[in-house]
Amino acid sequence: MAEVLEDPIVSEFETQSQAESYDSWFRAKVDASLADARPPITHSQVMAQRDSIITKAGQRDYTEWRQTNLLNLEIGQLHSMATTQAQRAI
């Protein structure tokens, strides 16, 4: 017997089985989090870690990365132009 599709207005899942599977997964994650014995991290600690990551990322030298990506873009454009010209020739 095929599963009945859930109403998209009522559920984001296509089937009841998918909804139940997600619910089980989510409850297991919550239970694991509640059972975690590590000390909690405050919001200000998380924001400080985030700011540190952003600052470090801003200090990186992206010159080589930009050059590589510009080269890849140019190669892609050349390939696209060559493909278009080849299609016109047919």
Image (cartoon, helix red, strand yellow):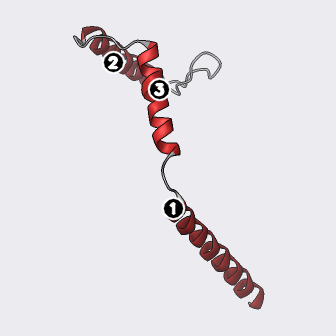
Q: Position of residue 81 (x, y in %)?
A: 71, 80
- Determine the residue positioned at 45% across, 23% down: 48
Where does the image place residue 19, in percent across and percent down from the top left?
A: 45, 20
Q: Quick one: SS at disc 1?
A: helix
Q: Amino acid at mark 2?
A: Lys
Q: CA distance from mark 3 to mark 2?
A: 26 Å
Residue 40, image quadrant: top left
Q: Amino acid at mark 1?
A: Trp
In the rendering, which numbered label is found on residue 3?
3
Tag 3: amino acid: Glu
Q: Nearer the viewer, mark 3 or mark 1?
A: 1
Q: CA distance from mark 1 to mark 2?
A: 38 Å
Image quarter (top left, top right, bottom left or bottom right) of the N terminus? top left
Callouts 3 and 1 close, C-beta under 8 Å: no
Left or right: 48 in relation to 27: right
Judge whether 51 appears above or below 57 on screen. above
Q: Is residue 33 visible?
A: yes
Disc 1 to disc 2: CB gap under 8 Å: no
- Residue for badge 2: 29
Point 45% across, 14% down: residue: 43
Please state which of residues 35 and 27 is positioned toward the viewer in this rendering.
35
Q: Quadrant of the C terminus?
A: bottom right
Disc 1: which residue: 65
Foreground mark, 1 or 2, reads: 1
Indicate whether 29 appears above or below 53.
above
Q: Please tell me which of labels 1 and 2 falls first in the chain.
A: 2
Residue 29, by quadrant, is: top left
Q: Is residue 72 left or right of residue 49?
A: right
Q: Does any portion of residue 2 appear in the rendered image?
A: no
